[in-house]
Amino acid sequence: MDYLIVKWLHILSSTLLFGTGIGSAFYMLFTSLSRDVRAIAVVSRHVVLADWMFTTTTIIVQPVTGLYLIHLAGFPWTSTWILWSLGLYFFAGACWLPVVWMQLRMRDMAQLAARDGTELPALYWRYLRLWVLLGIPAFFALVIVFWLMVAKPA
């Protein structure tokens, strides 16, 4: 019974992690491309909130439940699919950390521009480009992790 509960938590948290990530990225990107400073200020505030509420929580839950599942199922810790999954997961996390830092600054720039009725500074757009460039490999890394979890190739 422990295995099924932990597996359910693992799948649920991966769904929240991936879903929040892709949903936040979609809204942040397309709202930014609209160049509507007030909308960007609102959306960026909510994206930061979603990251703290859902992404941060599930980033912690994922390895805890995953490692416990490995233990419960008796998989060898040196299985190639496990090592690749962990490596790609931590790679995605390494991409996410600077994204969080940039999102905080982007949110602050948008809030200030909306308050003052000005355009977003050039730095906002540089951060947005880097934000996208970091998001792409993180997205594909997690897609591969999903495949490894399901296929468990030898």
Image: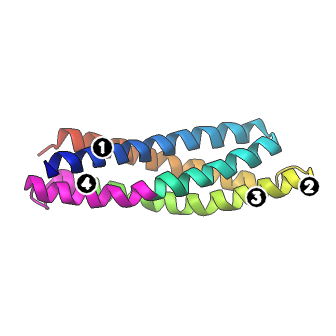
Please state which of the two labelled residues, at mark 2 or mark 4, is closer to the viewer: 2
Mark 3 neighbour density, 10 Å: few (under 14) some (14–19) many (20 or more): few
The span shown in magenta is 57-84
The residue pinned by badge 1 equals 11
The residue depicted at 68 percent of the width and 52 percent of the height is: 45
Taking the image as shown, residue 57 lies to the left or right of residue 42, namely left
The residue pinned by badge 2 equals 116
Q: Separation of disc 2 and disc 1 at Cα?
A: 44 Å
Local secondary structure at mark 4: helix
Give whichever of discs 2 and 3 has the lower sequence position.
2
Taking the image as shown, residue 82 lies to the left or right of residue 137, namely left
Q: Is residue 128 visible to us here?
A: yes
Q: Separation of disc 2 and disc 3 at Cα?
A: 17 Å
The residue pinned by badge 4 equals 84
Give whichever of discs 4 and 1 has the lower sequence position.
1
Judge whether residue 81 is colored magenta: yes
Inspect the image, locate mark 1, and give the three-letter code of the amino acid beneath it: Ile
Give whichever of discs 2 and 1 has the lower sequence position.
1
Q: Which mark is residue 118?
A: none
